[in-house]
Amino acid sequence: MSDSAKNTMTDEEKNTAAPEETEEHRKQVVIPLLQHRGAACEPLVEVGDTVLRGQKIGEEDEYGLAVSIHSSVSGRVIAIEERLHPHCSKQPSIIIESDGASESIKFKTNKNPSKAQILDSLEDAGIIELNGYPVYNTLLTEKTIDTVILNLTNPGDVSSNCTGENISKI
């Protein structure tokens, strides 16, 4: 069976219902500093720091192999330590205790950005291509950037645990 056929899900296998959440799941989040095929990024926060939802908490590296990571909750950083990653290895991770407020950073908009501003925004956002490379690296060689269209979905993604069993289907 081809790889593409293995990743095709029947309607019965697809689940669009929101996962059950317990109070415990909402109190803490573990955010790995490795979010793609590249390298782990460097943490920008320290234990005890207060963070906002959307705040950059990990920064890309000088080689362009790591991408920025952002907090999905507001709260307090309670640990920076290695945790088991979905790729079955231990990776540095930031553990945040949510304050339940979901206070977000304020985003700036620019209706007519320059090429440099577009590249900076893509780099800061940590957006990667399906092949694992940061989008901004791909666009560095372009003379001009007229339009950027991002498809931020990949219906073939399947998360699995270290034994290969499907634990959630997207």
Image: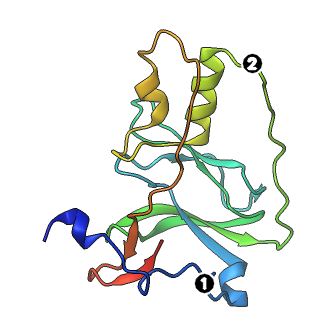
Q: Amino acid at mark 1?
A: Pro
x, y percent for residue 63? 39, 30
x, y percent for residue 112? 75, 18
Who is closer to the viewer here, 15 or 63? 15
**Residue at the location (66% across, 51% down)?**
45
- 118 left or right of 10 in image: right
Q: Amino acid at mark 2?
A: Asn
Q: Which quadrant would the N terminus be assigned to in this image?
A: bottom left
x, y percent for residue 163? 26, 83
Element under label 2?
Answer: loop
Q: Residues within 10 Å of mark 1 (few under 14, many from 20)?
A: few
**Residue at the location (35% across, 82% down)?**
166
- 83 left or right of 77 in image: left
Q: Residues within 10 Å of mark 2 (few under 14, many from 20)?
A: few
**Residue at the location (53% across, 11% down)?**
144
Quarter of image, res 82: bottom left
Tell me, for residue 19, which label it has, or none: 1
x, y percent for residue 125? 61, 41
Who is closer to the viewer here, 95 or 79? 95
Q: Earlier in the sequence, mark 2 or mark 1?
A: 1
Q: How many marks?
A: 2
Tell me, for residue 112, which label it has, or none: 2
